[in-house]
């Protein structure tokens, strides 16, 4: 379909001027060509999406997810990070074959796209990352994906432990194949898992290779106090400071969590423009703590949102993360410390900026790529809210998403996913998860 028209609705642009408009949004050739007023298709090849009673807005950008973990949803509850990894998640990931990784990624795509998430940054498992790219390609999701890199570590199963050189070579090959693929809808990000699973050599070489390729870096940092103590013991420095010393800081680096930071590390994030990837559900469920997000944002640190993996959430739902990002800080910083409009920006334009896609997606502006969603705000659980930001953050749910367009392609129409067979994806996921967990 070369033209798509969102007809009617309230247009929440999330542009720098915070414009809210009424009328139609027209997308042509994968770009936004009209905002507001009456949209008249210019060609005969068009589709009209009814958006009355909806907010029409940029799709959500989740900057930290693990689509390979979706089959472990509900299998790793009520554990703290290091036990969660060693007892369940790493053995699970080590047991995954290529078809399992694909099935897990498909299940994630069904949930993400139907819930209005149009872009993710994904940390895969160590192997079979081509499968995740292929699924994102077919599903129509915009994705920045990287294989997890792990060449050392206590409790890492043999099936995940890599040779340093082999890890770098595989990452480089994936980057070569996929970085910029599908009209730049797919990109590669180097993804060393976290300090405790990476040698210093691997981290140093990753910085060099990612910068040479123009790819992002994506890792976990300072999530949990036991992790922090182990990094100090093992590497002689605080987690973020240690990464900074190796060159892993800057606008091209995304650090998931950052719950526990020293004052010096807060300064490093601010001064280098390093991206903080906030995962409120995951931080609560793994009992990691609460990142000081409003305070860090006030200091100038850039923050975006992600659901992390299904086994530590247990959803991949942008609405849940927005709601928690707005609520969990208020008892500490007061009711105005994290306002709904800023949370919507964090979940859209903030995510796009974190992924180096700020000029392309994340807001509705003429000429930007058409990643556009329509969210119903006339449900009994939403009306009579006036502010579209308050509706989105405090009242709406993923099931309120009516239409989703990515790169000008309609992927969800009247709540129906058009790119994957959702019932089949769900039954395949259930059967595979049963087999995998029976074998562990
Ligand atoms: Zn994670």
Image: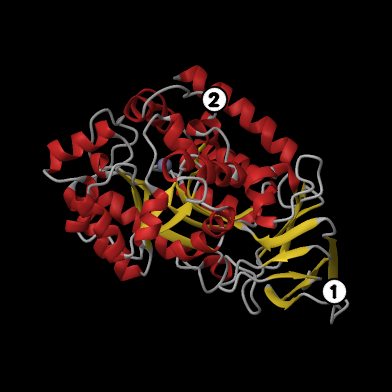
Q: 10 Å neighbourhood of mark 1: few (<14), some, or many (≥20)?
A: few
Report the front residue among 48 and 128: 48
Residue at position x 59%, y 41% in the image? 320
Q: Residue at x 40, y 49 (%)?
A: 293
Q: Earlier in the sequence, mark 2 or mark 1?
A: 1
Q: Residue lying furthest left in this view?
A: 236
Give the colouring mode of the picture.
secondary structure
189 versus 368 height, above or below: above
- Say few, some or many: other residues with alpha carbon within 10 Å of mark 2 (under 14 / 14 to 19 / 20 or more): some
Where, quadrant-wise, is the N terminus in this rendering? bottom right
Residue 79 lies, with reference to residue 200, above or below; the image says: above
Please provide percent x and percent y for residue 88: 41, 25
Q: Are marks 2 and 1 in contact (CB under 8 Å)?
A: no
Q: Nearer the viewer, residue 38 or 391?
A: 391
Q: Read off the residue under disc 1.
A: 45
Question: In the drawing, what numbered circle is on residue 330?
Answer: none
Residue at the limit of the structure toward the top, as seen here: 438
The image quadrant in which ligand 1 is located: top left
How far from the left and from the top, in percent, is residue 75? 51, 23
Quadrant of the rendered image containing residue 270: bottom left
Residue 98 percent across, percent down from the top left: 50, 40
Q: CA distance from mark 2 to mark 1?
A: 44 Å
Question: Which one is nearer the viewer's eye here, 284 or 207?
Answer: 284
Which secondary structure, mark 2?
Answer: loop
The answer to whether 66 appears left or right of 226 in the picture is: right
Residue 158: in sight, yes or no? yes
Residue 405 can be seen, yes or no: no
Question: Which numbered circle lies on residue 74?
Answer: 2
């Amino acid at each position: 379909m070369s033209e798509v028209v969102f007809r009617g609705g309230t247009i929440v642009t999330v542009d720098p001027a915070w414009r809210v408009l009424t009328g139609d949004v027209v997308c042509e050739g994968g770009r936004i060509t009209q905002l507001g007023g009456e949209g008249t298709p210019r060609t005969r090849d068009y589709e009209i999406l009814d958006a009355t009673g909806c907010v029409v807005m940029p799709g959500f950008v989740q900057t930290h997810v693990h689509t390979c973990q979706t089959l472990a949803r509900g299998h790793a509850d009520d554990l703290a990070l290091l036990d969660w990894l060693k007892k369940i998640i790493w053995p699970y990931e080590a047991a995954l074959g290529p078809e399992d990784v694909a099935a897990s990624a498909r299940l994630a795509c069904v949930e993400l796209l139907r819930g209005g998430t149009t872009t993710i940054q994904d940390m895969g498992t160590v192997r079979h990352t081509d499968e995740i790219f292929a699924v994102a390609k077919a599903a129509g999701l915009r994705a920045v994906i990287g294989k997890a890199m792990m060449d050392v570590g206590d409790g890492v199963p043999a099936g995940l432990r890599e040779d340093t050189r082999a890890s770098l070579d595989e990452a480089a090959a994936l980057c070569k194949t996929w970085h910029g693929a599908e009209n730049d809808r797919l990109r590669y990000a180097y993804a060393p898992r976290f300090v405790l699973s990476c040698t210093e050599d691997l981290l140093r070489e990753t910085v060099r290779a990612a910068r040479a390729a123009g790819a992002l870096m994506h890792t976990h940092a300072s999530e949990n106090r036991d992790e922090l103590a182990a990094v100090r013991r093992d590497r002689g420095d605080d987690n973020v400071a240690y990464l900074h010393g190796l060159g892993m800081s800057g606008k091209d680096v995304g650090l998931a969590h950052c719950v526990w930071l020293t004052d010096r590390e807060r300064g490093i994030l601010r001064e280098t423009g390093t991206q903080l990837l906030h995962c409120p559900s995951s931080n609560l469920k793994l009992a990691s703590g609460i990142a000081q997000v409003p305070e860090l944002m006030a200091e100038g640190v850039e923050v975006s949102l992600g659901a992390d993996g299904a086994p530590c959430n247990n959803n991949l739902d942008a609405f849940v993360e927005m709601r928690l990002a707005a609520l969990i800080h208020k008892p500490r910083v007061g009711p105005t410390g994290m306002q709904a409009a800023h949370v919507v920006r964090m979940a859209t334009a903030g995510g796009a900026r974190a992924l180096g896609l700020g000029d392309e997606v994340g807001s509705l502006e003429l000429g930007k790529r058409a990643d556009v969603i329509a969210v119903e705000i006339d449900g009994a659980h939403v009306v009579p809210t006036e502010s579209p930001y308050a509706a989105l953050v405090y009242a709406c749910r993923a099931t309120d998403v009516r239409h989703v367009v990515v790169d000008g392609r309609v992927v969800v129409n009247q709540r129906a996913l058009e790119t994957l067979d959702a019932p089949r994806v769900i039954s395949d996921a259930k059967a595979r998860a049963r087999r995998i967990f029976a074998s562990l």
